[in-house]
Image: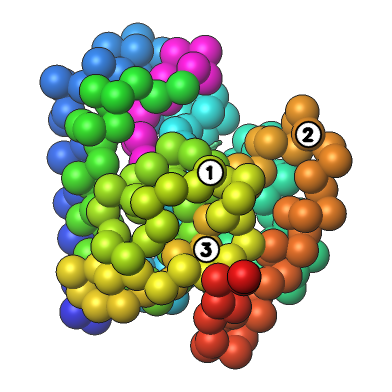
């Protein structure tokens, strides 16, 4: 599929989500004049970042990671020599949960198929789940990814896995918002982003460490 075809298919998914009246988050979106947030970046990107759900600024603008967590993410990308132009970025849940609460199981189940379709269109070689909700998504949808382990044990390593469209590497990272309450993780996160940049530059996996 060329870039235009991919962009058209992604745009069609956004329209479906716009009309998703069965979502438990639909009324909250409408009442607050929020937008659904599908994702942003090149449909040809080699790498897709997956966050949790839009926050307030994201829901107001319809763009992912443009609020406080987005500023942290931009800093980590810049330190590693990467920019948003290098990536496609999206979330597991496409509408803002009230008061930034965790997405509920029912919401994740409803929105996950849209994320799966986005990945099947973009077909990235590298997938980066940010935080535990995105980690659970990849665990459910990719074979070969470790069945056990949390972000704190799996972060910064590229795991080979199988998608319906072929082989991928999945590198789990801490969610950027973690830095709001765990400043001590700053160095570890910066190191992870640099490893990710190396992975992209070398076209080689960092490989699971012993
Ligand atoms: N946090 C997320 O997980 N996603 C966003 O888009 C913004 C904040």
Q: Which mark is residue 171?
A: 3
Mark 3 and 2 residues: CB-CB less than 8 Å, in contact? Answer: no
Q: Please tell me which residue is depicted at 34% across the width and 12% down the height of the picture.
A: 28
Bounds of the magenta segment: 91-101
Q: Is residue 143 above or below residue 26?
A: below
Q: Earlier in the sequence, mark 3 or mark 1?
A: 1
**Residue ID for mark 1:** 150
The overriding secondary structure of the stretch rendered in magenta is loop
Can you tell which of label 2 and label 1 is closer to the viewer? 1
Q: Secondary structure at mark 2?
A: loop
Q: Is residue 16 above or below residue 195?
A: above
- For the N terminus, the quadrant is bottom left
Q: Please tell me which residue is depicted at 47% across the width and 33% down the height of the picture.
A: 54
Q: Is residue 143 above or below residue 36?
A: below
- Distance from disc 3 to disc 2, alpha carbons, whole Å, reads 20 Å
Q: Please tell me which residue is depicted at 14% across the width and 20% down the height of the picture.
A: 22
């Amino acid at each position: 599929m060329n870039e235009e075809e991919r962009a058209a298919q992604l745009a069609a998914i956004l329209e479906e989500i716009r009309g998703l009246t069965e979502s438990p988050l639909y009324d909250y979106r409408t009442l607050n004049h929020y937008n659904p947030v599908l994702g942003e970046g090149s449909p040809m990107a080699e790498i897709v970042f997956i966050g949790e759900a839009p926050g307030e600024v994201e829901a107001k603008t319809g763009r992912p990671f443009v609020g406080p967590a987005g500023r942290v993410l931009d800093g980590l990308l810049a330190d590693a020599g990467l920019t948003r132009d290098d990536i496609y970025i999206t979330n597991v849940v496409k509408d803002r949960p009230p008061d930034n609460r965790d997405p509920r199981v029912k919401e994740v189940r409803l929105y996950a198929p849209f994320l799966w379709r986005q990945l099947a269109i973009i077909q990235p070689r590298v997938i980066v789940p940010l935080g535990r909700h995105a980690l659970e998504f990849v665990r459910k949808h990719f074979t070969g990814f470790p069945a056990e382990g949390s972000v704190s044990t799996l972060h910064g390593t590229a795991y080979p896995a199988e998608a319906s469209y072929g082989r991928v590497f999945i590198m789990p990272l801490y969610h950027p918002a973690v830095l709001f309450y765990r400043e001590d993780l700053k160095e570890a996160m910066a190191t992870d982003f640099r490893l990710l940049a190396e992975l992209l530059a070398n076209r080689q996996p960092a490989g699971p460490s012993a």
